[in-house]
Amino acid sequence: MKVIVKEEAELSRLIAEEFIAQIQKKPNSVLGLATGTSPLGVYANLVKANKEGRVSFKDVKTFNLDEYIGLDGTHPQSYRYFMNVNLFDHLDIKKENTHVLKGVGDYVSYYKQYDEEIAKAGGIDLQILGIGSDGHIAFNEPGTPFDSLTHEAELAESTIVDNSRLFNDISEVPTRAVTMGLKSIMNAKKIVLIATGVNKAKAIKNLLHGNKTEDNPCSILIDHPDCTIYVDKEAYSLSK
């Protein structure tokens, strides 16, 4: 596992360059995408590169990590809405090639086929992750089995509190989600994780210096053959 420590703007630029290089090497790349505030700078850099003609997404396929149960794609806090507004609407990507788990309707049938659809696409070439303050990746909370595939998840109280900043009130935060599992994530050929801010320092310390345990979901990344951790000085402050 490789660790890169830079300022947040530089982290976002470097990760975006990894995505650009991947697409330039393989124009029909399959990308694994995340939501939340952490990847926003990365996505802004990708939009800029696309508009400048440095990279095209016309043959790219994407699969997102997760979605809240109970929110449809038009809800401002749904992850489909997030991806459209912050990335997809600004790229030359075909919307039918962008896959986000569903939180309404027959979402069960959809998520049960998700891993198969990823495999049919050829597997994820490059996956971006964030990390929760409790060490969760996607919505794989502490205690999630390492062999888990895409599934329904009950959100931990700490996750609900962390995510409440994006809602008007904590009572509006969904308590369940559908998420790619830990095995699903580990199936990606290459993984990059971005973490910024002092509130991620403990999680990063546990990832880099702790034991592999299902109580710390991100610790599974220790076993991945091509995983790079991008952190700023604050997130790395307990790991020196």
Image: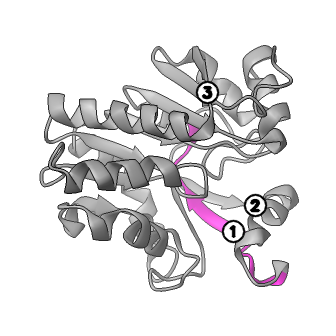
Residue 112 or residue 223, whichever sits in front: 223
Question: Which amino acid type is marked by label 2?
Answer: Leu
Question: Which amino acid type is marked by label 1?
Answer: Arg
Residue 6 or residue 86, whichever sits in front: 6
Would you identify the image quadrant in which residue 240 lies? top right
Mark 1 highlights which residue? 176
Q: Residue 71: x, y in percent? A: 56, 81
Q: Residue at x 20, y 49 (%)?
A: 60
Alpha carbons under labels 2 and 3: distance apart: 31 Å
Q: Is residue 171 visible?
A: yes
Q: Residue 203: x, y in percent? A: 79, 34
Q: Residue at x 74, y 24 (%)?
A: 207
Alpha carbons under labels 2 and 1: distance apart: 6 Å
**Label 1, residues with CA under 10 Å away: few <14, some 14-19, many ≥20:** some
Q: Residue at x 48, y 70 (%)?
A: 82
- Ranked by sequence position, the earlier of labels 3 and 1 is 3
Q: Residue 11: x, y in percent? A: 53, 34
Q: Is residue 21 above or below residue 60?
A: above
Question: Which amino acid type is marked by label 3?
Answer: Lys
Residue 7 or residue 157, whichever sits in front: 7
Disc number placed over residue 6 in the picture, else none: 3
Mark 2 secondary-structure assignment: loop
Q: Which residues are magenta?
A: 171-182
**Label 2, residues with CA under 10 Å away: few <14, some 14-19, many ≥20:** some
- Ranked by sequence position, the earlier of labels 2 and 1 is 2
Judged left or right of residue 65, residue 207 is right
Mark 2 highlights which residue? 155
Q: Is residue 212 above or below residue 67?
A: above
